[in-house]
Amino acid sequence: MSIFSGKLPGVGSSIFTIMSRLAHKENAINLAQGFPDFSCDPMLLDLVEVHLKGGKNQYAPMAGVPALREILADKISSSYQQKVEPNNITITSGATQALFTAVSAFIKPGDEVIVIEPAYDSYVPAIKVNGGVPVFISLSAPEYNIPWERVRAAVNDKTKMLIINSPHNPTGRIIKQQDILALEKLVQEKEILILSDEVYEHLVFDGEKHESVLQSDVLKPYAMACFSFGKVLHATGWKLGYIVANEELTESFRNVHQFTVFSCNTPIQYAIADYYKEKVYLSIPDFFESKRKLLREILDQSRFSYLPAEGTYFQTVDYSSISAESDFEFACRITKEHKVASIPISSFYHNKKDEKTIRLCFAKKESTLERAGEILSKL
Ligand SMILES: Cc1ncc(COP(=O)(O)O)c(C=O)c1O
């Protein structure tokens, strides 16, 4: 093999890059990529300035700024009724790095990792670059329920890890108490690691509550949960997140983390530590639920139908009464001809399973959603 051949040949650009690029080229409203088009809290920006100007500009400790890990430990302990120590938390460069490092820390060539699809796009490359083998469990619209019997049946001697994500991108579905029970049963029978992507933990609506793997004593020895400040603070560009796991798993995680990233942005960690004293994240569900309400009211006037979703800032919609095109063709055409960009759900499946659904991001100003709504309701 040529010395020039890399470890992930042919992965190409992510669908988020493709659709955002197209949105930009076509001057379309971007409901594709998951980022807010509004600013974060000025108080938070002031705190960043305080710490930037106050000299907090050198390397942070490898695991993260202690003040931040302390406040997170308190937050987690009160949210999930489980004692978590600051030393169980490692600050990362976004959830993407937490996920990648967690996979790198444990997955050796030939290890199998169960991935539930549709799946966020970073999981599979992380597995493959480490020589692991993704094993797919495919969910279906509109319910996207996890078939635990099929998950159980997919576990064999080579299975090392299961990746789960709730609230789930792209479907917006959440796992419930019965899913946590199914996970507990699984690890008791099969002993596998659980990597739980919980970046949308605060974006849960309809009076539902986020079920974290952190709340279970049974899952504790097996589970790592990762989170993103980008989603909570409306600051996806800061790329800061964290991972929570017991001591043993944390040690293995940090063995890789310290030689890849070592430590993350110092002044922003101090700023978030101060900002979290206000428990601002508690207002997030209402803030986003009103945006989802607006988007759904708009969709009610259209030929799109929306699928059940209790979380995240995404709404999956079915366009089958408008067109028979593939979801990729439909999403591209709507971006070019009607100037609203979305993400085709098939891009979250390894085999591009097409159920005539697209994902719309409602983390946008009301005026943006209204402008997009006016267009979508005419299709
Ligand atoms: C499900 C999921 N996991 C992880 C991430 C990455 O988070 P971060 O931006 O903190 O790396 C995202 C971002 O969109 C996501 O939707």
Image (cartoon, rainbow, N blue to C red):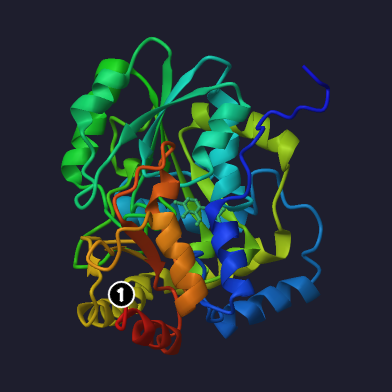
Residue 109 falls in image quadrant:
top right
Residue visible at 64% across and 36% down in the picture: 10
Depicted 190 relative to depicted 22: above or below: above
Q: Residues within 10 Å of mark 1 (few under 14, many from 20)?
A: many
Q: Position of residue 163 (x, y in %)?
A: 41, 35
Residue 138 falls in image quadrant:
top left
Depicted 78 relative to depicted 149: above or below: below
Residue visible at 37% across and 51% down in the picture: 77
136 lies left or right of 218: right
Query: Mark 1 belongs to which amino acid?
Result: Arg
73 lies left or right of 116: right
Q: Nearer the viewer, residue 240 or 302?
A: 302
Kindly give the residue lying farthest to the top in the view shown. 157
Q: Quadrant of the N terminus?
A: top right
Q: Position of residue 252 (x, y in %)?
A: 58, 27
| Secondary structure at numbered mark 1 | helix
Depicted 163 relative to depicted 5: above or below: below
Q: Which residue is mark 1?
A: 292
Q: Is any atom of residue 354 visible in this view?
A: yes
Q: Quadrant of the C terminus?
A: bottom left
Q: Nearer the viewer, residue 47 or 296?
A: 296
Q: Position of residue 218 (x, y in %)?
A: 28, 30
Residue visible at 22% across and 61% down in the picture: 307
